Amino acid sequence: MKLFRSLCSLLRKEKLDAAMTEEMQAHVDLQTERNRAEGMSPEEARYAALRQFGNVASLQQETREQRTGATLELLLRDVSLSWRSLHRSPGFAVTVVVSLALGIGAATAVYSVAHALLFSPLRYAAADQLVEIQSWHQRDGASDVAPATFGDVAAANASFQSVAAQYYYYVNLTGRTTPVLLNSAEVTKDFFPTFGVEPWRGRALIADDFHPGAAPVAVLGHALWREMFQADERVIGTQIMLDEVSHTVVGIMPPSFKDPAQTAVLWRPMLGGRDNLADRASHYWTMFGRRKAGVALVQANAELAAIGERMRQAYPEHYENWTLRAVDLRALIVANYRQGLLVLLAGVGCLLAITAANVTALSILRILARRRELAVRMALGSSLGRVLRLLAVENLLLSAAGGIGGVLLAAWSVPVLLASLPEGWLPRADEVAMNLPVLLTGLGLAAICGSLTGAAAGRLLLRVQANDVLKEGSRGASGRSAGRLRTGLIVGEIAVAIVLLAGAGLLGRSFAGLAERRPGIDAARLLSVTISQSGKRYDNPAKGWSYFSRALEAVAALPGVEAAGFTQTSPFRWGIPIAFAPGEPRSDGRTKIVQAFTDAVTVDYFRATGIPLKQGRIFTAADDHRAPPIVVLSETAARQLFGASDPIGRTINAGPEAIFTVIGVVGDVRRSGLASESPPQVYRAMAQRTPSFATLMVRASVAPASLAKSVQGALLGIDPDTPVTDVTTMARVVDRSIAQPRLHLVLFGVFAGLALLLAAVGLYGLVAYNVEQRGREFGIRTALGATRTDILRQVLADGGRLVARGAMLGVLGALIGAKALEGLVHGVSLHDPVVLLGGVAVLAAVALLACWLPARRASKSDPMVALRAE
């Protein structure tokens, strides 16, 4: 019935509006003039004319417009009054705006990073269907797949629309003034279709490009095209020299496309003649898949497990204790950052809570200071709603200023934060931006803080009784209620501040422990240089070894060089994991497999890096291609392969054609980072296996950075077409491995420092207000014989009780919340008493200072003032 009446009313309104024709409007205007001639006001004349012609709808519309105009005028008046009121209290306004800006700025900055990494989809078509397919060992965990494993999955699966694989390969871009080392991705034919990407210009790789004997082609990344080819679209169809082999540029990828690891700058086809598709031992292909519509990840993993079981039965020597699994690609990309970002979001949430509490406490103190003013307004006729609206406008102005300041602070701090991180360290860093969702989040946080503050202020104002307030000396119920609310807010601030201080303390002790860990190499005076040979010029091991030998002689002869040695890979940056087994290959499948990083190194590599010999011997000049295949193991590799047995003289194998004799054991290297344990490492003699690229380690007797130019010049003097890149100190490389713990510590430390400052400001404001309210009491106590020390002790005791209550809650919260830091701290107990007591001590010291300042003022109370008032 109510719906029917509303519908009839709407139809009647439309009918009346339609009835207002031009003719009727003319009659209304004429009658309005007649009514004005009879002495009516313009409003009365118009109203009477409309009533006469019965156009109630038009009358209501004009009435609404008048009310809207009056409301707007009243709102503008409130804004003006609020601005003048805040202008008279600049200290309060500035404190609130700065507090809000700091809290909202920190929250917005952290959320902008979390939004890009955790919440926004990957920049691929239907990105939620993309997975990485991994080999999974029951002891060693995840690794890439072997080439033959990729072929088995591609042929047997029914869950994936397409699968693709890639591996990285250094190539030299020559034919330029200075040769450049580029990171190429060799990919299978379905690589670009799997990611659902089309080229920006030209074409992608097609099936004909993968045939043996096909003309070499390359697809350029957009950034490489802009930097190396001056953004010239005419490069498509031209020839470029990669490893001294002419490649035709067939396409340019769009700016938004990057491979998941954001490493490759160009893509080339995998060729059957160059890549061993029957290899089941070497896990170096990264495999991706696009699930079919309607196929859940659980279903895909069940099928992969079945394929893995069939592979294990067919090839037990390669797949014993191995299986296959698919992992959501976005989750995998940010897996190492997810927990840290969530912890930072929680930390910045605590800081924001302290900010809101502090602003609320300050607003309450301001209302209490204005109680008489507000009571006079209500006594003179202002309604409670009018006063509440005035306070709401003040909160709106402060929140808007704090929100805008916070967003501007975040917009400034995010680029600074990203610039301070090592290049390429943070995935999806180019997607971190102050976009619309982040901007709305920052302004929304400001609105929430303003709403909470306004609600607390409104609740307090509802308790104000004008007659009671106007009575001299009366505090009223609102004063007691406000006191309890302020006290609760300050206690809460202290508790949350201790939680943040404890978290920062745990991260700090953990980082200090990591920084003191021995990396396994002496990185203090070590220079690292990457070299990549041309596959055409150095087309056999003898030519490649000749270059490396001449390079070692040239660098070793430089002043300030103590030792120099080559390694195929680079510790703390990247490595090549290969499966090894002790003894001779077995056909019964009962083989103990150990995934170990494998390097080919020169004789002086161990001396240059400071890796100590533990047992046996290291390589000598006699260990060349004519000598039997030999290896040196790290301590971890020897222990995992042979247990407690002596490994010297025993053999290991990486397949029937790769059997090696162990000649020595050297110290472990934390090559995956200081936060990780030392993985197994197998070293081969570079004279027996000469790679096309290597890293030169130079031990310096002077500052290693000072040798950079001379080392680079010596190497280019041997072959000016061989790129010499990544010239850096190993100390910097090792330090980069703890960039993530350092970032967590710095940000959490900033949050804890701001929380401590805000809590101290809030406590100071509360104690100062209480001292002001008790001024007469302190004067009378002094008149009755109390000393300044007594007054000082009383005020400090009152503040100390608040700190004690907050500290107890904070310690409890820290004990509960420490679980969130599990996995982010190393070598420190999550409930470390030193950290907890240290956090409480720091806060107590700051809180004591915040209480002492108003306590000192209270101790100087003049008793004569109090007695005159009484």
Image (spheres, rainbow, N blue to C red):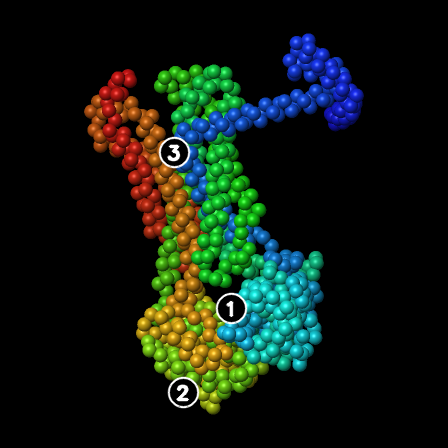
Give the quadrant of the C terminus: top left
Q: Nearer the viewer, mark 1 or mark 2?
A: 2
Relative image position of residue 360 (x, y in whole percent)? 44, 34
Mark 1 vs 2: CB contact within 8 A: no
What residue is shown with label 2? 621
Relative image position of residue 112 (x, y in whole percent)? 52, 50
Is residue 26 positioned above or below 639 on the image?
Answer: above
Provide the secondary structure element on which disc 3 rests.
helix
Q: Which of marks 3 and 1 is in front?
A: 3
Of mark 1 and mark 2, the one earlier in the sequence is: 1
Q: How crowded is mark 3: few (under 14 residues within 10 Å), some or many (20 or more)?
A: few
Mark 3 vs 2: CB contact within 8 A: no
Q: How far apart are marks 3 and 2 (CA)?
A: 77 Å
* Type of amino acid at the residue the image marks with label 3: Gly
Q: Residue at x 60, y 25 (%)?
A: 69
Q: Distance between the residues labelled 3 and 1?
A: 60 Å
What residue is shown with label 1? 140
Asked if one can make out residue 97 in the rendered structure from this viewpoint, the answer is yes
Residue 810: quadrant of the picture: top left
Q: In this view, does 22 lie to the left or right of 352?
A: right
What residue is shown with label 3? 91
Provide the secondary structure element on which disc 1 rests.
loop
Q: Which residue is drawn at 57% across and 68% down?
A: 229
Q: In this view, does 754 lie to the left or right of 246?
A: left
Q: Residue at x 48, y 37 (%)?
A: 401
Please give the count of numbered marks on the rendered protein: 3
Relative image position of residue 358 (x, y in whole percent)? 42, 37
Asked if one can make out residue 457 in the rendered structure from this viewpoint, the answer is no
Residue 88: quadrant of the picture: top left
Is residue 407 positioned above or below 113 on the image?
Answer: above
Q: Which of 756 and 45 is in front in this view?
A: 45
